Amino acid sequence: MRLFFVNNLGVPGLDFQREERRVYPEGKITAHVVGFTDVDGHGVAGVEASFDDLLHGHKQSIALSIDTRMQYIMHEEVSAAMAEFNAIGGGRASA
């Protein structure tokens, strides 16, 4: 099977640029912990926001350790509570 890409057409004026794309290895189970960035690459939620200066300003990386089993259990419990109460969102209550 031969792959054909539009980029290979060589059409003048048709240009593609490579962009980074966030990938969540465990999908929505860890996405809220990792967080996300805005269009300028600045963290606006989760770890991305907490460590924005370190990640964005200095181009350093950090390593996370997330217990995906615990995250899955929490996701299931919050989802069940949302279904029970017909909620549009859920999270932990602040102490």
Image (tube, rainbow, N blue to C red):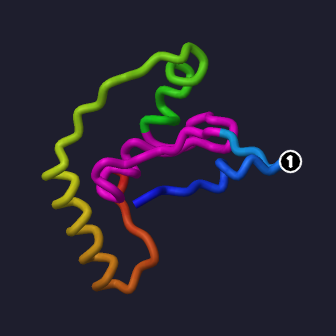
**On the rendered structure, is 16 left or right of 50?**
right
Q: Position of residue 95 (x, y in %)?
A: 33, 49
Residue located 76% across and 45% down the image: 15
In magenta, the rendered stretch is: 18-46
Residue 19: within the magenta?
Answer: yes
The structure residue drawn at horizontal position 29% and vertical position 73%, both measured from the top left corner, is: 79
| Image location (x, y in percent) of residue 22 | 48, 44
Near mark 1 (Cα within 10 A), the count class, few <14, some 14-19 or many ≥20, is: few
Question: Which residue in the rendered view is the most extreme toward the top?
Answer: 58
Left or right of 16, for residue 63 = left
Residue plotted at (65% across, 56% down): 6
Q: Nearer the viewer, residue 83 or 48?
A: 48
In this rendering, is residue 81 above or below 69? below
Residue at the extreme front: 1
Residue at which label 1 appears? 13
On screen, residue 78 above or below 65 = below
Quadrant location of the N terminus?
bottom left
Q: In the displayed image of the protein, which residue is found farthest to the left?
A: 69
Disc 1 on helix, strand or loop?
loop
- The image shows residue 18 at horizontal and vertical percentages of 62, 39
Left/right placement of residue 18 relative to residue 12 reads left
Which percent across, then down, holds residue 85? Answer: 34, 84
